[in-house]
Image (cartoon, grey):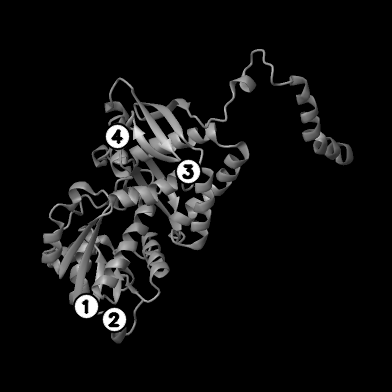
Amino acid sequence: MIEKASLKAKKIVLAYSGGLDTSIILTWLRQDYGAQEVIAFCANVGQAEELDGLEEKAIKTGASKCLIRDLQEEFVRDYVFAALRANAVYEGQYLLGTSLARPVIAKHLVEIARSEGAEAVAHGATGKGNDQVRFELTTMALDANLKTVAPWREWSFSSRTELIEYAKSHNIPVPVTVEKPYSMDRNLLHISYEGGVLEDPWRAPDEDMFLLTNSPEKAPDQPTFIEIEFEKGNPVAVDGLRMSPARLLAHLNQLAGLNGVGRLDLVESRFVGMKSRGVYETPGGTVLWLAHRNLECLTLDREVINLKDSLVPKYAQMVYNGFWFAPERLALQALIDHSQEKVNGVVKLKLYKGSCWVVGRKSSDSLYHDGFATFEADQVYNQAEAGGFIKCNGLRLRINKLLRG
């Protein structure tokens, strides 16, 4: 926190979304904090229509200018697919949609601050959440001299209800109302919903909240079959059609969302210490995770799979907690990427009424050998040798029983 007025930055680049918090921050930084110039930066990571009219709105709300960068391909290629190669999933369920978007946004926030000669960057993350950590750890990792202004840790507001009242008094248009107070974060990997009516973990989310997925009841009555091709652990084609990373994910979002795949209602452990309830839609990501995991079953050695599986919780925790650019995540990524050299092939999946199954897989790098695996007669495996194998593996169990009863 910046305590002395003399240390307050005069030129600031704000990570701007046009939502409730950052809309108010634009005004607050100039009128209350004392910044002379605020540059709004919006990273396009797949917010769709949320970007409409954003530049005009930012200028009207107090920004000297609004810079919008299309980061969709970079986001999916360098962040989403990197986590996919790791099979990263936080606390067994969450596919890290917000966690993966924050470091790419913060990376460009730092770049713009440098090019614009700004003394500080700012974000709209609350003092209770994870995003403040992700933004600021990334900033520290990429530029040791940039200050960070975190209004939620400095201003007198204590709730989003107070922010709505501030917005009304300053004629700031915001997309959140008292009647519909949950917040939403969208990118190409997912949409997250939290806060407001969702803070009661017993209350089911309203059906009209969901934007990317049909309810299973309204999904088509006939299943959809798709084939996803991978090269070195990265998805490169759907049904034989090669696509760029962002286009491929958007295509799968449409197919999986139509079939009601990818909803998650989760109470998760925030890095700062408390539990929080989030509702997520991750249609394409859910399909990719399942397909990639099953292709690895076909192409990776057993002990490599076991090693990777043991590292998944640690990798996911690093990403969730904001350590994307930390040396330990980079080192672990190098190991993971080495394991993906032979993860090549095609996976066939069935999408139906909110569920997704793998129904086939093939690879020129497969380790599946039907001559060894068959239950029919074979010429390559002597079943009698299994007895010695079992005795050797059971020796410690026999000794334990003999000596300790």
| Residue indicated by mark 2 | 8
From mark 4 to mark 1, how far is it between C-alphas?
Answer: 43 Å
From mark 1 to mark 3, how far is it between C-alphas?
Answer: 43 Å
Counting residues from the start of the chain, the first of labels 1 and 3 encountered is 1
What quarter of the picture does the C terminus occupy? top right
Question: Circles 1 and 2: CB distance less than 8 Å?
Answer: yes
What quarter of the picture does the N terminus occupy? bottom left
Q: Secondary structure at mark 2?
A: loop
The three-letter code of the residue at mark 1 reads Ala
From the viewer's side, name the closer residue of 370 and 128.
370
Q: Secondary structure at mark 1?
A: loop
From mark 3 to mark 4, how far is it between C-alphas?
Answer: 21 Å
Q: Percent from the top left, x then y, of residue 132?
A: 37, 64
Q: Secondary structure at mark 4?
A: helix
| Residue indicated by mark 1 | 35
Q: Who's the residue at 74% across and 20% down the image?
A: 383
| Residue indicated by mark 4 | 257
Classed neighbour count for the residue bearing mark 1: other residues with Cα under 10 Å, few (<14), some (14–19), many (≥20)? some
Q: Percent from the top left, x then y, of residue 382?
A: 74, 20
From mark 3 to mark 2, how far is it between C-alphas?
Answer: 42 Å
Q: Is residue 232 left or right of residue 198?
A: right
Counting residues from the start of the chain, the first of labels 2 and 4 encountered is 2
Classed neighbour count for the residue bearing mark 4: other residues with Cα under 10 Å, few (<14), some (14–19), many (≥20)? many
From mark 2 to mark 4, how far is it between C-alphas?
Answer: 46 Å
Q: Who's the residue at 45% across and 43% down the image?
A: 93
Q: Percent from the top left, x then y, of residue 375?
A: 64, 16
| Residue indicated by mark 3 | 87
The three-letter code of the residue at mark 4 reads Gly
